[in-house]
Amino acid sequence: MAQAQTTIPYREAGGPQGKAEPARMKFYVDVKRCIECGGCEVACKNENNVPPGIARIRVVTINEGEAGETNIAVPCMHCSKAPCVAVCPVDALYHRPDGIVALNKETCIGCGYCLYACPFGAPQFPKGSAFGARGVMDKCTYCAGGPEVAFSEREKRLYGSNRIAEGKLPMCASVCATKALIAGDAEEVANAVRQRMAARGAGGGAWGWDSAYGKGL
Amino acid sequence: MAGLANVFGYGAMTNHQNDIRNSRSIMIIGMNPAENHPISMQHILTAKEVNRALIISVDPRFTKTSAFANKYVRIRSGTDVAFVYGLINIILANGWEDKKFIAERTYDFETFRNEIAKYDPDTASDITGASKEDLLWVARTLAENRPGTVIWAMGGTQHNHGTGVVRTYCHLQMVLGNMGVPGGGTDVFRGHDGIQGVTDVGGGPETLPGYYGVGETAWKHWAKVWDVPYEWLLARFKSKAMMEKPGFTVARWYEGVLLDAKELGQEANLKAVFFMGHSTNSMQQMDRVKKALEKVELIVDIDPFVTNTAVLPDRKDGIYLLPAATNYEAAGSATNTNRDLQWRQKIVDPVYESRPDLTIMVDLAERLGFKKQFIHNMKGDWKGVPATPMSEKDKYVKALPEQTIEDVLREINMGCLSIGYVGQTPERLKRQQEWGHVFDIKTKKAVGGPVDGEQWGLPWPCWTDKHPGSAILYRTDIPVAQGGAGFRAVWGPTAPDGKTMLSADGSAPKDGPTKGYPAQKDYAVDLTGESIKLALAEGRNPYGNGRARFNSWNIAADPFPIHREPIHSPRPDLIVKWPTYDDVKEHYRVPQPYKSMQKPEWVKSFPLILTTGRVVEMEGGSAPQRTSSWLVELNPEMYIEMHPKVAADHNLRHGEMCWVETPEDMDAKPSRIKVKVKITKRVGPDTVFLPFHWGGVFEGNSLAHKFPEGTAPFSIGESANTVTTYGYDRVTQMQETKTSLCRVKKA
């Protein structure tokens, strides 16, 4: 295994925390904005050269064709307390200092525990191989490559592109037509979401609001 | 486009997509931007969130856009006139109209009011299927939330009275006074990024570039621009009459091959057909297109991909495929739905054997013997084109240099004075490209820098190379120098009934004459540009300041739009009361029957309404998209959307195959296609929906073996247009693909 030379995005010292520290990279999917155009799915595949059958991000639609039809793009949510990291028996999954849940494909034994642990369906396994052998897991890297020399051929082949090391955001969020999928440091993402919710008023369209506070609020 | 032009003067979207951020109500009718214009949803949803704009979606299908609407109203396909006039009926009954706007800026409201009386809520509800409560809710919402915009696309236009439908949308906005204001307007979204430009430079058969028509004045104007003798142009046609006669349209060219020459508006049948970036599976009655492609002597298909056209006909010879370059392989300008021009840069050199369209055209002109005239205009020859005749070395030139395409745009700038295509010079477009970051997202106006005050894309009319462009048409609260304008005074100073066509005192763009005035004499043909400058110097708009028309007295269809039942109507009772037009002997050189094709008995054997449309993963004929593995993975195969009740009644399950059959129309037997069933409540129990992007399968038989080796797309499927039926707009000959009748059978 090559030694990780990860480039970690940092918060500026002037932030609310008052000190320079690693950013906490997050996705947020605005269900009042996602129109299921599939731009994120195609951009991800093109950027990272993801093979057919593997979906590092996909858009799920519920109540299709009826009132309440809602779309949500589901990448790896890069959980702070990630169940996949907790269950991985070989520590192939781990948190980077910036909160991105990264994967070491050369450590992964393909046991599939993460597949069962993840509530979002993020871990992907090649389908259709003989005897149901799972092969090595693949997942959203937050476009941050993997534990290899950044921009190396090897990183590209195993994990795809490394836009984070280039100082860019993940491709899916960069192309989102309606800015439903937003990415970045948790503080900035939270600010963007807070502004949208304030503009929308009560309820704000936050996902789960109806079940938490009832309809009509 | 003809609908808009016949009401306001210009056939284009009046406001721009970013401007929707200013709207307080948004009625989306016959349109599904979430799938067809995903980026526009950013503006629509921002208006919803920030302005609390109310979104109303009116459509036979509960679309992905409807999911974001505050109100969804399902109407029967092809009943838009009755729906919109029903709304206006309610608005007038309650006195919600904008009386000042109507008095000052419109023509013949009095007669219009009488026409509207026919569409009382009961009638409108009966025709459309929308409830009276919904009609009232929509009318009240539009009246209480101004400014509002009306957005439509092919769902409005693809009907036998599509031009009428478009005019009703315009009339609604005139009654509400929503014209010429930010957040208002009639916002038709064009289907491709360059299609407004195609219309502007004379893509249609009825006009030369710049909407000059094909009459003698038009030819003489362009003869001057091209610096060729008018007589030379005339000599290239069989006669002056043929020179000034509109040609065939893309919708019905094949009848020029199939019908007896005696029935045509020209002496001989068509012998050759030349496709450039067009796919036959996006056009109606594809079974007849197939026959024509088998009969015609020569087919040339110029495209980056092997399209449906190449594999559809059963023929072995006389069909030539020329590889065209994509937009990434050549520089140039594109004009989008906002009337914005944008400069594109070349990203890579043309790959393999492909060549940009312009190179192909210049080469073709050379072989046909008029390259000298083709590359020439009143300012000289286009730069960068190899000498005539091409040397052996130049013969295979793959791409002409960027300066050639710049000169093409300069030629457009020279000639298209009528629509103010003057100020969009290559230099200004490239400067905007460099300074894109200083333009405001809501107003599209630049703040500071060398582009200060310019509108993004210099939307036409952009009268001079100093003019900022007109982002919002017909806006009187700003001076002409900043893009202000009244309606176009294109129908003369008085109407046939003697009433004035010039706007009333107090209604004019700022800093000029305060009332209506006719167009500046010769502004559209004065190639020195002095006439335009003269008008601008006095604060007048070169095209005048006129009135928008409720009564389009000189249109081929009804002066006031009338609801016309679709040719394939499911309501025999309404065919009696609201029939289609009388048969037309000749329209764009082919006979165009209406009433004789509208048969009330069809609904007995074909009980379901068939409508077609687009899906987000695909586009048009979709040869490129179906050749992309990522897109095919998301939407792998052709299908039919069917309500659960229809599926159950036909003993069909989700994922099973079924036959879809439509009436025989002009052929001996019904057309049919075999497609997969998708059960969904998007459509109601009276309607089924087909996406029209697929090709490569015909009536159940795969045509995959006919693609040249290695060129077959990842996904082939039945074309919806194999089963779409006869029916064409009375003015534009737009196809009636949005409403037909069909039956389904288990396969």
Image: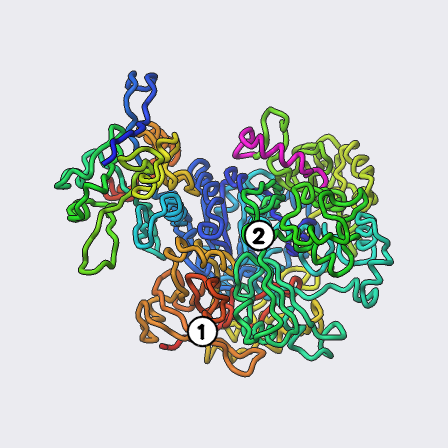
Residue B673 circle label? 1
Extent of the magenta region: B421-443
Where is residue A123? Give x, y as percent. 23, 46
Residue A94 circle label? none
Name the N-terminal-most of marks 2 and 1. Answer: 2
Q: Quadrant of residue B157?
A: bottom right
* In-front residue for pair B654/B280: B280
**10 Å neighbourhood of mark 2: few (<14), some, or many (≥20)?**
many
- Whether B424 is among the magenta residues is yes
Q: Is residue B646 left or right of residue B551?
A: left
Label 1 secondary element: strand
**Amino acid type at image mark 2:** Ala
Where is residue B138? Give x, y as percent. 48, 51
Find disc 2 in the rendering and name its residue: B325
Split into 4 quadrants, where in the image is the C terminus of chain A? Answer: top left
Where is residue B638? Give x, y as percent. 41, 65
Split into 4 quadrants, where in the image is the N terminus of chain A? Answer: top left
In this rendering, is residue B564 above or below B22? Answer: below
